[in-house]
Amino acid sequence: MIISNQKRLAADILSRREGRTVGIHRIWVNPDYLDDVTNAVQKDDVRQLIDDGIIKAKPLVGNSRSRARKAESQKAKGRRKGHGSRKGTSNARNPKKHRWMKTIRAQRRTLKEMRSDDIITASQYRHFYRKAKGGSYRSVAHLKSNIQLEGIEIGGEA
């Protein structure tokens, strides 16, 4: 029994009813009523079969995003970053310039706070600022230890 014409007519009718395209591969025909479907030649006949529930449109099938969401949440936690997951070089993934900007901004922020809190004078601030710019300090902790070596007392350590 060839019912390709009936499926095409049903797809056209159901597309108008759903408001979006229904392809012929989404058309389901009740196998118990194949004779009735074969005899349905006109659009009205097919429309009647749809109303009777003999011909239906299968639901749309999509791809589940649950695995993608799980992977995304793991990446947010810092997982899945091993050698097998990497594409770019270490410099492409975390550029030297960005690393430098992160450290120098933290150091300059610390120096400004020290100057505003009168821990260091303006001339001392300028001295340490220039040294920080030259890359003398690895981190804020290194900067503070060097300031203490100069004989300047930094409060806050218990």
Image (spheres, rainbow, N blue to C red):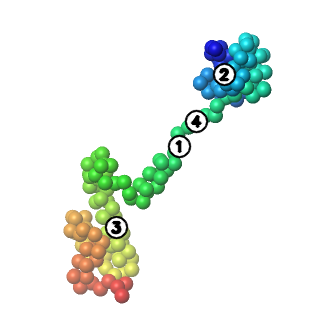
Measure the alpha-carbon separation of dots 3 and 1.
43 Å
Query: Would you name the residue on which mark 1 appears?
Result: 64
Q: Residues within 10 Å of mark 1 (few under 14, many from 20)?
A: few
* Left or right: residue 56 compared with residue 131: right
Is residue 9 in view? no
* Left or right: residue 60 compared with residue 110: right
How far across and how far down the image is residue 57, in percent? 67, 29
Query: Would you name the residue on which mark 4 appears?
Result: 61
Measure the alpha-carbon separation of dots 2 and 3.
64 Å
Q: Residue at x 22, y 65 (%)?
A: 135
Q: Quadrant of the N terminus?
A: top right
Measure the alpha-carbon separation of dots 4 and 1.
9 Å
Query: Would you name the residue on which mark 3 appears?
Result: 106
SS at mark 2 in the image: helix
Q: Quadrant of the C terminus?
A: bottom left
Closer to viewer: mark 3 or mark 1? 1
Task: Choose top left, top right, bottom left or bottom right for residue 31.
Answer: top right
Sequence-wise first label, 2 or 3: 2
Query: Would you name the residue on which mark 2 appears?
Result: 11
How far across and how far down the image is residue 53, in percent? 75, 28
Measure the alpha-carbon separation of dots 1 and 2.
26 Å
Above or below for 128 versus 7: below
Sequence-wise first label, 2 or 4: 2
Measure the alpha-carbon separation of dots 3 and 4.
51 Å
- Hey, what amino acid is under mark 4? Val
